[in-house]
Image (cartoon, rainbow, N blue to C red):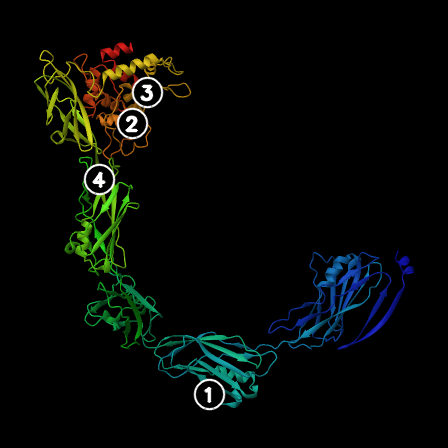
C-alpha cells in the first residue's frame, strides 16, 4: 500500500536553511501531493516573563489544524524554534492530557529548540494530533529574557509515510521588570516611654532579581501612630550606607530614604533599613505597626511589617463619637453608658490605684449624676463615691489590687443620668483620668454626652366607679356622666390643647351621643366641643391651648353619654378618652357603660274576677334587659277602658258594675293590659281566681284549645321512618298531629338526638300557644338565632333566664334537670300521690332537687330505672316531647282533645 501511494505522489523536497540565534538548524519543508496539511492560526502568541515567579507558559497555537486526505493517523511531528532561538532560555513543552491525545509522547532537545512528538505504531488519530499540537506551549527560563520574536515551525509525517508542509507561527517575548523584595523579621520590638530610641529590625534584607541598586524606600507607622512618635535614620558610614539620606514627616509618621542616582547597592539598602530606629514623646502605650517598602525606580515592593510595642505610663483612650441621653417620659430616666469602648493600658504597672470621672463641661448642679456599680465578677475591689456638688465620681481600689482589665471593665460601665424632668440640653463633656499602682498619672481623655429633653406625655386616669345608663323608664332618657372621677396630670405642661372622647366599642350611629356643654368659663376655660354622629367621636379643643389642667379635668368629667333610640341596643359601650398637650397624645383610658333598657311590664295577677263593690290588688313589675326587675306599681299611669265597670288607684282595682273591662298600666315606654271581670254579689268572692289553676297566668287555655283543634282539623302527617318501634312512637305521632313537632327532610324524626336550648324553647312556645305582649326579651347572643322569637317570649314571662354575662347559649344542649325547671314555671305543680319521690342520683344540694321531686309527684316525669333520674344527662327529642304532652294533658279539656 505504501509503494502504491508513492507511485502517484509527487514529492518536492526543498532544504531550507534557517539562521538561528544560537546556531543553524536545517528543516525539510515538504510540499506533498499526499494531502497531509498543517495550518496555523493568524497572528501571534504573546509571552510575558513572570515577576519574581516562574513565568507562565503560553500556547503557541491553540487553533492549529491537521488534515490528511490519505491517512487517518500520524506517526510523528516536529515543533522547532526556527527563528531567534536562544539556548538556555527557550523551552517548548508538551503534556499529554490522557484523554484527547492518544499515545502521543514528546522529547525536547534544549540545545536545538526542537520538540519531537511520536505515536507508537502511528496509532494516534488526526484529531488526537490536532489536540496535541494545539497544547504545545512556549516559555522562557531567563529572569530577563531576550525579547526577539521567536518563529515556531510545525511539520508532521503520517501513518502512510507522507510528510506534511511546514507551517509557522510567531511568539512575541516581553521582559518584566522584577519588583524589589523586602523581608523583615515580623517580630515585636518593645520601647519604654522616655527611653532612647530603639532599632526596629536588624534583620531586614533587600533583594531584586534584575537590579543591583534601589532608588528609594519608606518606613512608616501604618497603625497606632501617636503624636510624638519618631522614626530615625542617620548615614554615619558611606561605605555601609552608600549615599542614602532620610527625611521624616512627623504629621504622617513616614520616613523617606533616597539614593541620588539610585547608586546605593542592595547591601547598602539592607544596612540602612536595619538601622532605622523608633522613639516617642507620647505617654500612650500600645502597638505601632511599622511598614517597610523599597523602590527600584519603576516598581515598589510589597509592604513588610514589624511591630513596636510602646510601654509607658497609664493611658486611657476614649471611643470616638458621643453617648446620647434622652430624658424619660413620665418615668425615671434610663442612665446611658458614657463609653463602653474605653481602653486602659499601662506599660509600667499591672494595676491602678484610683480613677476620676468628672463632668468637665456643661455640668448642671442638681441635675447631673454619674453612677458606678461593681458587678462583683469582673471589677475586682473597685468602689466609687459621687460628689453631686462638683460632678466628680471617684473610684478607688484598696491596696491598688484591681488589674488593668478590671479597671477597664469598671470604667466602661460608668453611666450618666439626669434627675430633672426637663433637663438642660447642653452637651456634657466627661473626662477620665487615673493613677497606677506605681504612682504614675495617666493622660486625661474625654467623651461627650448629648442630652435630649422629652416632652412629658399627659396622663389620664379613669375612676373605678361603674356607669349605668337606663332607658325606657321615662319618655326621654337622662344622659349620664361617663366618668365624673377622671383625673389629668402632665409633668411639664399646665395646659392642654385638645381631647378626644369616643365610643370606641359597639358604637351605633343614630343611637349613641356624647356631649359637653361649656356653661361656666371659670370652670371649663375656653373649651368647646363638637360631636360626630358618624364616628361617635366628641372632639374638644382649647384655642391657644389656654385651658388649664383643672379646667380640662372638669370638662372631661362633665362629658355625658345618652342613647336617643326608642329601643336601644343594650350591648355595653366602651368610651375612650385621649388628651393632647400640643405635642403628644396621652395613652387612651376607657370607661365601660352598662345599658339597661326597660324591656317589658308584667302584672301579678293580670286577670281579675272581683265582686262589685269589692277591691283586689295587682302588682306591676318592670323588667329590664339585664334580667333585673323592679316593683313600679306606685309609678305607673293607669287608664280604664270602661270606667263605669271598674276603677284603679295605685294597683288597687275596685269593681263598680257587673261586666268586663281592661285596665292599662303605663310605665315609661311600656304598657300592659289587665283583664277585669266584675261579678254580682252572688258570684265568686272578691279578688279570687278560679278554684284550681292548671297553668300559669300567661298560658291562655282558650287559645291553646283553639290551636290544638285547628291542627287536628288540618290532618297533618303523623308518621316518621325511624319511630315505628320506638318507645315514644305514640307521643311522637300525637306531637306531629297537633303541629308542635316536625321531622327532617329525609323523613326521619331522630328521637334519640339531643335537644338544644333553642329547640326546646321553640317546642314549649308551640306546645302552649304562647304569645308575647311586650315584644320579647333579647340576650347578647340571640339576635341572630333562628329561635330568637321563642326565646324572647319565654324570657319575657320569666320561664327562662340567661347567664350572668347576659348570654343565653341557644345552641348548647339542654339537660333533663333544665327541662324540669322550665316546665315547672308553666305548670302549677299538684301532686297526684301526695308524696314526692327522691332519686338516689340527686344530691341534697342539687339546684333542681325540689323541682324534680315536685314534677315526679305531679306525674309528669319518671326516672330511668334503679331509682335514678340522671338530671345532668342530655335531654333527647323523644323525652322532651313526652314530658311536654304530659304537662298539656293536666288540663282535662286539653287531655280530652288529645285523646
**Horizontal and vertical percent for residue 776?**
25, 28
Q: Secondary structure at mark 1?
A: loop
Residue tagged 4? 594
| Residue 339, above or below 679 | below
Q: Are marks 2 and 1 in contact (CB under 8 Å)?
A: no
Distance between the alpha carbons at the discs numbered 2 and 3: 21 Å
Q: Residue furthest right?
A: 7
Of the image marks 2 and 4, the number of the one nearer the N terminus: 4
Residue tagged 1? 234
Q: Mark 3 or 1, which is nearer the eye?
A: 3
Q: Mark 4 or 3, which is nearer the eye?
A: 4
| Residue 667 found in image quarter | top left
**Horizontal and vertical percent for residue 594?**
22, 39
Q: Secondary structure at mark 3?
A: helix
Distance between the alpha carbons at the discs numbered 4 and 3: 38 Å
Q: Mark 2 or 4, which is nearer the eye?
A: 2
Q: Are marks 2 and 3 in contact (CB under 8 Å)?
A: no
Of the image marks 1 and 4, the number of the one nearer the N terminus: 1
Of the image marks 3 and 1, the number of the one nearer the N terminus: 1
Q: Determine which of the numbered discs, if any, sits on residue 877 in the image.
A: 3
Viewer-nearest residue: 822 or 269 = 822
Residue tagged 2? 789
**Horizontal and vertical percent for residue 581?**
24, 58
Task: Work out which quarter of the rendered image holds the C terminus and state it.
Answer: top left
Residue that appears at 28% across and 43% down = 505
Q: How many marks?
A: 4
Distance between the alpha carbons at the discs numbered 2 and 1: 113 Å
Q: Mark 1 or 4, which is nearer the eye?
A: 4
Amino acid at each position: 500500500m505504501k509503494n502504491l501511494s508513492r507511485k502517484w505522489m509527487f514529492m518536492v523536497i526543498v532544504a531550507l536553511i534557517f539562521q538561528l540565534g544560537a546556531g543553524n538548524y536545517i528543516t525539510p519543508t515538504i510540499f506533498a501531493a499526499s494531502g497531509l496539511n498543517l495550518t496555523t492560526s493568524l497572528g501571534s502568541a504573546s509571552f510575558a516573563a513572570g515577576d519574581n515567579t516562574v513565568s507562565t507558559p503560553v500556547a503557541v497555537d491553540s487553533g492549529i489544524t491537521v488534515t490528511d486526505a490519505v491517512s487517518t493517523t500520524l506517526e510523528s511531528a516536529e515543533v522547532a524554534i526556527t527563528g531567534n532561538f536562544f539556548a538556555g532560555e527557550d523551552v517548548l513543552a508538551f503534556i499529554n492530557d490522557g484523554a484527547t491525545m492518544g499515545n502521543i509522547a514528546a522529547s525536547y532537545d534544549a540545545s536545538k529548540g526542537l520538540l519531537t512528538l511520536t505515536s507508537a505504531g502511528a496509532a494516534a488519530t488526526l484529531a488526537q494530533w490536532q489536540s496535541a499540537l494545539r497544547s504545545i506551549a512556549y516559555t522562557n527560563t531567563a529572569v530577563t529574557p531576550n525579547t526577539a520574536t521567536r518563529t515556531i515551525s510545525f511539520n508532521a509525517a503520517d501513518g502512510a509515510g507522507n510528510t506534511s508542509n511546514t507551517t509557522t507561527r510567531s511568539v512575541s517575548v516581553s521582559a518584566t521588570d522584577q519588583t524589589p523584595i523586602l523581608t523583615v523579621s515580623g517580630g515585636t520590638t518593645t520601647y519604654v516611654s522616655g527611653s532612647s530610641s530603639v532599632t526596629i529590625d536588624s534583620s531586614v534584607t533587600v533583594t531584586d532579581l534584575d537590579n543591583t541598586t534601589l532608588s528609594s524606600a519608606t518606613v512608616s507607622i501604618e497603625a497606632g501612630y501617636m503624636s510624638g512618635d519618631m522614626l530615625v535614620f542617620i548615614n554615619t558610614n558611606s561605605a555601609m550606607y552608600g549615599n542614602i539620606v532620610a527625611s521624616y514627616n512627623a504629621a504622617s509618621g513616614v520616613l523617606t530614604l533616597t539614593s541620588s542616582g539610585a547608586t546605593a547597592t542592595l547591601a547598602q539598602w539592607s544596612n540602612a533599613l536595619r538601622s532605622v530606629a523608633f522613639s516617642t514623646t507620647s505617654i500612650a502605650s500600645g502597638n505601632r505597626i511599622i511598614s517597610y517598602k523599597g523602590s527600584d525606580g519603576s516598581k515598589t515592593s510589597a509592604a513588610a511589617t514589624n511591630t513596636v510595642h510602646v510601654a509607658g505610663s497609664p493611658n486611657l483612650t476614649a471611643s470616638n463619637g458621643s453617648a446620647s441621653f434622652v430624658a424619660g417620659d413620665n418615668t425615671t430616666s434610663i442612665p446611658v453608658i458614657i463609653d463602653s469602648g474605653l481602653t486602659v493600658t499601662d506599660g509600667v504597672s499591672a494595676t491602678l490605684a484610683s480613677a476620676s470621672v468628672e463632668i468637665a463641661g456643661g455640668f448642671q448642679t442638681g441635675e447631673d449624676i454619674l453612677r458606678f456599680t461593681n458587678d462583683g465578677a469582673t471589677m475586682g475591689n473597685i468602689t466609687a463615691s459621687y460628689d453631686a456638688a462638683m460632678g466628680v465620681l471617684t473610684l478607688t481600689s484598696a491596696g491598688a489590687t484591681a488589674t488593668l482589665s478590671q479597671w477597664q471593665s469598671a470604667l466602661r460601665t460608668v453611666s450618666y443620668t439626669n434627675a430633672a424632668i426637663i433637663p438642660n440640653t447642653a452637651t456634657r463633656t466627661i473626662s477620665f483620668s487615673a493613677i497606677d499602682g506605681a504612682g504614675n498619672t495617666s493622660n486625661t481623655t474625654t467623651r461627650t454626652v448629648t442630652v435630649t429633653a422629652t416632652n412629658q406625655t399627659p396622663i389620664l386616669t379613669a375612676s373605678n366607679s361603674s356607669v349605668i345608663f337606663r332607658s325606657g323608664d321615662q319618655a326621654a332618657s337622662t344622659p349620664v356622666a361617663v366618668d365624673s372621677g377622671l383625673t389629668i396630670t402632665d409633668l411639664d405642661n399646665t395646659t392642654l390643647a385638645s381631647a378626644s372622647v369616643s365610643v370606641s366599642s359597639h358604637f351605633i350611629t343614630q343611637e349613641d351621643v356624647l356631649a359637653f356643654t361649656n356653661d361656666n368659663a371659670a370652670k371649663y376655660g375656653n373649651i368647646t366641643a363638637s360631636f360626630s354622629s358618624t364616628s361617635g367621636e366628641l372632639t374638644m379643643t382649647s384655642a391657644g391651648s389656654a385651658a388649664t389642667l383643672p379646667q380640662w379635668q372638669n370638662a372631661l368629667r362633665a362629658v355625658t353619654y345618652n342613647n336617643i333610640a326608642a329601643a336601644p341596643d343594650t350591648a355595653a359601650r366602651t368610651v375612650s378618652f385621649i388628651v393632647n398637650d400640643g405635642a403628644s397624645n396621652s395613652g387612651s383610658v376607657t370607661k365601660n357603660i352598662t345599658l339597661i333598657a326597660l324591656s317589658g311590664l308584667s302584672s301579678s295577677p293580670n286577670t281579675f274576677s272581683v265582686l262589685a263593690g269589692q277591691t283586689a290588688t295587682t302588682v306591676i313589675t318592670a323588667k329590664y334587659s339585664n334580667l333585673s326587675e323592679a316593683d313600679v306599681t306606685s309609678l305607673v299611669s293607669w287608664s280604664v277602658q270602661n270606667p263605669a265597670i271598674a276603677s284603679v288607684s295605685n294597683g288597687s282595682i275596685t269593681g263598680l258594675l257587673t261586666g268586663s273591662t281592661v285596665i292599662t298600666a303605663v310605665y315609661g315606654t311600656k304598657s300592659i293590659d289587665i283583664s277585669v271581670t266584675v261579678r254580682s254579689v252572688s258570684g265568686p268572692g272578691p279578688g279570687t281566681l278560679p278554684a284550681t289553676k292548671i297553668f300559669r297566668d300567661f298560658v291562655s287555655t282558650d287559645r291553646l284549645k283553639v290551636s290544638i283543634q285547628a291542627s287536628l282539623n288540618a290532618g297533618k302527617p303523623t308518621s316518621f321512618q325511624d319511630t315505628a318501634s320506638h318507645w315514644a312512637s305514640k307521643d311522637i305521632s300525637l306531637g306531629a298531629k297537633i303541629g308542635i313537632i316536625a321531622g327532617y327532610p329525609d323523613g326521619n324524626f331522630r328521637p334519640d338526638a339531643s335537644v338544644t336550648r333553642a329547640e326546646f324553647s321553640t317546642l314549649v312556645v308551640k306546645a302552649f300557644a304562647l304569645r308575647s305582649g311586650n315584644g320579647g326579651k333579647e340576650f347578647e347572643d340571640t339576635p341572630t338565632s333562628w329561635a330568637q322569637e321563642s326565646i324572647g317570649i319565654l324570657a319575657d314571662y320569666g320561664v327562662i333566664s340567661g347567664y350572668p354575662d347576659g348570654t343565653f347559649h341557644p345552641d348548647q344542649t339542654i339537660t333533663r334537670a333544665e327541662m324540669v325547671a322550665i316546665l315547672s314555671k308553666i305548670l302549677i305543680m299538684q301532686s297526684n300521690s301526695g308524696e314526692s319521690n327522691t332519686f338516689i342520683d340527686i344530691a341534697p344540694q342539687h339546684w333542681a332537687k325540689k323541682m324534680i321531686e315536685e314534677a315526679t309527684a305531679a306525674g309528669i316525669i319518671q326516672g330511668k330505672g334503679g331509682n335514678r333520674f340522671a338530671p345532668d344527662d342530655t335531654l333527647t327529642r323523644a323525652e322532651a316531647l313526652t314530658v311536654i304532652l304530659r304537662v298539656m294533658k293536666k288540663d282535662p279539656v286539653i287531655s280530652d282533645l288529645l285523646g
